[in-house]
Each structure stands twice: as structure tokens, then as C-alpha cells.
């Protein structure tokens, strides 16, 4: 008995619009009779020639391994992170690397179609997508970059405000792509919370849970992967919270982020959290730790990566895990604190007073003696301050020499001529 594949939208899409948390997902045609049984004998299920769950490898090796070999069909995956930490960029980057084998449909509730084009083309060209939107990159170059890519987009200018209608639009476009290329596309929704907005009596958490359930039904019904970008609770905007989570070697602690955004962790087979560090001094790619907090067909754990915020490109790099480890984070915090202390000392030295290390230790306001000494030693070691022999008059107005702390290039006082 072949696996029932819906040939028309009318056979099951109305169920998506009507779906409530208590309703079971449809397998072929949804039951309309409340008394009709939806349970099946195991022998009946075994007789269905349903295609196996297919796996498509992705380019970030460690993440690919954690996901059980890549992205999976008939599964909903959620990508969560604070704002500006590369959620949208990651899915676009992975889609680009895979589109030759698996076409993709990108749906955005924030960006219009031309902005989505710019994100994709910016990644390919290696330029900021905002430069394309601003017209700084020629349209011919953009066209050449995206030519032949099996990617279609639905911008916020085309998405319906009504949740049910939006879901039917997404499913319909996916079916059109399936008929065109012979395989259902990878559907990317960016982002989930915006799709769940409404003014009805149901709370946002409940509506987000509904959206997650409906996206899972689309994945199951169209036999395709669905990935949804998900925002997180505001507590995860706080760097102190992120640093606290970095102390754990268990990626499952990041499930807390999904919890704050609705019941997505129940509907999703995979939950990813992007922990992205700051840009290195002098520029470059930001280190990142991709936490696989849940993976039904793989395992939990961390994948090291690097993210270029300008182009939206991601690469795998295991060394990034060390940079974002708790000891490294603590060392950077200590270093940052030392830099602040050094700045205080240098500002005091610039005031024109010439002092020895001991005199500075007792004179600098706001710093303990130990912090002052540590800051002086650090600044001298890094060449921000120097020790020089200087001449001065003592209490009896006799000329003496002493070692003082000055900025590089400051001339010591010379003995007075006799």
C-alpha cells in the first residue's frame, strides 16, 4: 500500500488553519467525523510504503555529526539566539550550501523579498547585504550571483497576517516547488514568534506553540525539513546569563531558551542555540558555540564555529569552543577589568604628577593598592607605561634621583646645572 501523498491542497490544508493543540496531526485526509477512530494497527502502518526519513549533510562538520548526519525530512528544527547573533545568516548559509541537492523556500516575517535576495546574494558575493539594499552593488552582479540557485522566497510583503492563511500559503508554495523540482523543499521560517502574533484571547505562548505544531504538520505532510528561527526570552540578551550558561558542559541547559518562547521544544525534533562571542580586536569572524540542546535523531552537544556578521557566512572551527569556554570567558573578564584599571592609572600619570610606583599606589583614587600595583605592572609589561630615572628635589631641596612611572616618550628630568 503506497504512502498517501496529498495531490491537492484541499485534502489537508484546511486542517492546518483549524488546528488546535488537542487535535492529532493528519496523515492523509483529516478525519471529519468526531467519532471516527484515528488509531491504526501496527500491521497496517507496517504495510504503508512510506519513504524513509532522508538526511542531507550540511557543511559544518561537527554540527552535522551531532544532527545524526545532517538535516532530516519530516522534522521541525528550531534555531534560537539573541538578536544579531546570526540566526537568519546561519540558515541562509546552510541553505546555499545545500540548494543544489535540496531546493529551499525561505519565508520571512521581517524582511521583504528584495531584502531576502540581498541576504542570499551578499553571502555569495562576500559583501554586507545592506550594501546591496543601498544600491552599492550593481544589479547585474547580484543577478549573476543568484542565477540558477534553487531558492524561492516569500517576504513579509507577501505573507498573510492571519496565521492559518499564512500556513496555507507556505504549504501551497512548497507543493509548487515539489512539482517543479520533484522533491519537497527545505522550508525556513524566519521567524516563528512574528508568525504567531494576534489580538485574540489566546496568549502569545499558546499561539507560538500552535505555530510550531502546524509547521511540524507541514514537515510531516510534505515529507520535508522545516527549520524555524526563534527569538528567546530577554534574560538571554544579558551577557551575564550567557556567561553563566557557558560554565555548563551540558548543551541541554539551553532548552531554557526555547521554553521562554512557547512550547516549541515539544513540537521540535531539534533545538539549536547560537552562543556567539564578540568580534576580535582588529576585526574578523566572531567565535561561536552552537549548542544542540535537543536532537531526536542525533545527540546533544556543542559544535564550534565562526560567524562573519558582515557577509553572513558561517564556518566550522573547533577552536572556537575553547575561546568561549568558561575559563577563557573569565580570563577575558579579568583582562577587561585590568584594561580599565590601566586606563585609570594612565590618566593619572598624564595629569602631570611624577610619582614612583609606591606613590601612585597610595594616590590613585578608586583603586585598592593591590589593583593599582597590578595595573602598573601590566601596563609596563605591555609598553603602555615605562619606568624611568628622574631627578627631583627632596624635602631638604637636595637633588635626588628616583624611578618614576611615565608614558612612553616622556622625557625624564635632568640634573640642574651647577
Image: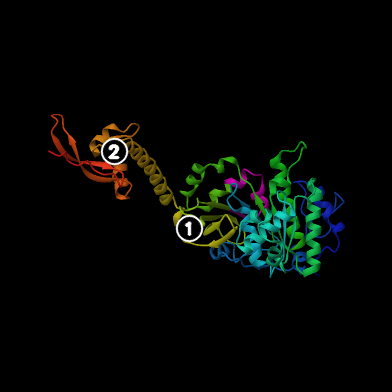
Find residue 262 and report its horizontal and vertical position in percent. 66, 44
Mark 1 burial class by Cα count in 10 Å: few <14, some 14-19, many 20+: some
Residue shown at 62% from the left, 43% from the top: 260
Q: Which mark is residue 320?
A: 1
Asked if residue 266 lies in the magenta stretch, the reply is: yes
Q: Say whether residue 238 is left or right of residue 332.
A: right
Circle 2 residue:
370
Q: How many labels does the image show?
A: 2
Q: Quadrant of the C terminus?
A: top left
Identify which residue is drawn at 28% across, 32% down.
363
Magenta residues, start to end? 256-272
Pick whichever, 404 or 110, lies toward us.
404
Q: How crowded is mark 2: few (under 14 residues within 10 Å), some or many (20 or more)?
A: few
Residue 251 appears in the rendering: yes
Relative to 349, is 5 on the left or the right? right
Q: Among all residues in the image, which is located at the extreme front?
A: 418
Amino acid at each position: 500500500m503506497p504512502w498517501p501523498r496529498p495531490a491537492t491542497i484541499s485534502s489537508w490544508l484546511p486542517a492546518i488553519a483549524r488546528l488546535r493543540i488537542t487535535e492529532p496531526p493528519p496523515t492523509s485526509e483529516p478525519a471529519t467525523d468526531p467519532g471516527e477512530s484515528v488509531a491504526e494497527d501496527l500491521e497496517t502502518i507496517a504495510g504503508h510504503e512510506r519513504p524513509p526519513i532522508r538526511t542531507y549533510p550540511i557543511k559544518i562538520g561537527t554540527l552535522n555529526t551531532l544532527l545524526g548526519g545532517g538535516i532530516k525530512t519530516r522534522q521541525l528544527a528550531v534555531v534560537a539566539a539573541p538578536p544579531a547573533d546570526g540566526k537568519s545568516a546561519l540558515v541562509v548559509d546552510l541553505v546555499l550550501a545545500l540548494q543544489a541537492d535540496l531546493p529551499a523556500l525561505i519565508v520571512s516575517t521581517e524582511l521583504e523579498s528584495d531584502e531576502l535576495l540581498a541576504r542570499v546574494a551578499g553571502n555569495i558575493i562576500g559583501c554586507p547585504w545592506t550594501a546591496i539594499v543601498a544600491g552599492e552593488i550593481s544589479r547585474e552582479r547580484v543577478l549573476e550571483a543568484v542565477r540558477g540557485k534553487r531558492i524561492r522566497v516569500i517576504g513579509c510583503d507577501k505573507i498573510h497576517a492571519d496565521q492559518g492563511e499564512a500556513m496555507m500559503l507556505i504549504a501551497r508554495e512548497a507543493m509548487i516547488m515539489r512539482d517543479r523540482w520533484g522533491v519537497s523543499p527545505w522550508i525556513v521560517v524566519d521567524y516563528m514568534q512574528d508568525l504567531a502574533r494576534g489580538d485574540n484571547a489566546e496568549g502569545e505562548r499558546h499561539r507560538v506553540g500552535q505555530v510550531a505544531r502546524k509547521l511540524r504538520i507541514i514537515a510531516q505532510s510534505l515529507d520535508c525539513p522545516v527549520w524555524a528561527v526563534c527569538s528567546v526570552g530577554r534574560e538571554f540578551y544579558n551577557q551575564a546569563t550567557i556567561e553563566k550558561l557557558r560554565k555548563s558542559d551540558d548543551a541541554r541547559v539551553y532548552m531554557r531558551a526555547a521554553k521562554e518562547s512557547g512550547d516549541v521544544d515539544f513540537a521540535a525534533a531539534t533545538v539549536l542555540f547560537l552562543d556567539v562571542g564578540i568580534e576580535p580586536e582588529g576585526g574578523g569572524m566572531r567565535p561561536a558555540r552552537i549548542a544542540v540542546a535537543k536532537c531526536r535523531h542525533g545527540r546533544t552537544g556543542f559544535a564550534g564555529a565562526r560567524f562573519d556578521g558582515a557577509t553572513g557566512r558561517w564556518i566550522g572551527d573547533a577552536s572556537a569552543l575553547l575561546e568561549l569556554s568558561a575559563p577563557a570567558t573569565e580570563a577575558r573578564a579579568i583582562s577587561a577589568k585590568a584594561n580599565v584599571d590601566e586606563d585609570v592609572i594612565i590618566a593619572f600619570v598624564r595629569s602631570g604628577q611624577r610619582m614612583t610606583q609606591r606613590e601612585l599606589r597610595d594616590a590613585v583614587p578608586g583603586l585598592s593598592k593591590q589593583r593599582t600595583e597590578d595595573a602598573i605592572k601590566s601596563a609596563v609589561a605591555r609598553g603602555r607605561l615605562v619606568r624611568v630615572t628622574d631627578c627631583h628635589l627632596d624635602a631638604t631641596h637636595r637633588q635626588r634621583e628616583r624611578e618614576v612611572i611615565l608614558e612612553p616618550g616622556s622625557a625624564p628630568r635632568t640634573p640642574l646645572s651647577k
